[in-house]
Amino acid sequence: MAPDGTDIKEIVPRSAGYLPDDLVFDGKGGFYFTDFKGGSSSPDGGVYYVGPEGGDPVSVLPNLKIANGVGLSPDGKTLWVTELAGGKLHRVSLADATTVAPFGAVVTYTFTGAGPDSLRIDAEGNVYVAMYGQARVLVFNPLGLPIGQYLLPGRDEGHNLRSTSMAIRPRTDEMLILTNDWDQGEGSTIFAVKALAKAAADPASSK
């Protein structure tokens, strides 16, 4: 759609059978989206790419157990994906927009407990993963090694557990973490914290 909400166009129709969850644009105007299907014993989800000219989605990373978060490194060469029901963080080196480089797809981290949700990447390539049901955000360096975490207030008392997503304000290092209290009575909350680096530049600026 246009910035004012007009000129709405359907790119991936409901009839195509996907269950889109998260998406991220590349520097060429195409985008990757996660197909939020499957379960802990059924790898029916995956990651797909739609080019700047549209067309049918192209499979990039298949056979995932509820693909959820997706992001690109600042240089656009590394795709990051979280697998909610599989409890994994995937680091994928790209040969081109839809081709995984030889030996380029690795699982850099396996989670315990409730699974990983959305992810974001800062200007230095650090990866932030919201942990659904855990009231926290885990941080990984560009190699996928854990380097820190943010624990949300009320966590020890069972509040704000449903931490699902976050965003870093453009041109700043302020990160906003979104959560809700499920059925514990404290509603939805946005927490503000300082990220390890400023937000990554808009991919369109590299075109």
Image: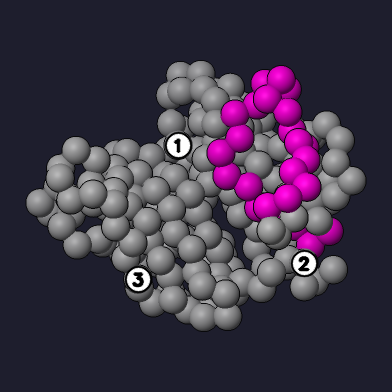
Q: Quick one: label 1, few (<14), some, or many (20+) residues within 10 Å?
A: many
- Could you say whether the residue bearing mark 3 is in a helix, strand or loop? strand
Q: Amino acid at mark 1?
A: Leu
> Residue reaching furthest right?
53
The type of residue carrying mark 3 is Ala
What residue is shown with label 2?
Answer: 204
| Front in this rendered view, residue 77 or 17 | 17
Instruction: Check if residue 155 falls in the magenta segment.
Output: no
Residue 107 can be seen, yes or no:
no
Q: Which residue is mark 3?
A: 192
Q: Earlier in the sequence, mark 3 or mark 2?
A: 3
* Residue 6: numbered disc: none
Q: Mark 2 is on which residue type?
A: Ala
Q: Nearer the viewer, residue 6 or 107?
A: 6
Instruction: Work out how far the residue at label 3 is from the one at label 1, CA to CA, in angstroms.
Output: 24 Å
Q: Percent from the top left, x then y, of residue 18?
A: 65, 26
Q: Which residue is mark 1?
A: 84
Displayed quadrant of residue 137 = bottom left
- Magenta residues span 5-28
Residue 24 lies in magenta, yes or no? yes
Asked whether the residues under the numbered discs 3 and 2 touch, taking CB atoms below 8 Å apart as contact, a structural biologist would say: no
In this rendered view, identify the residue nearer to me: 173 or 91: 173
Locate residue 169, reporting x and y percent: 51, 72
Residue 62 in view here: yes
Q: How far apart in space, not on screen, are marks 2 and 1 (Cα)? A: 29 Å
In the image, is 7 to the left or to the right of 20? right
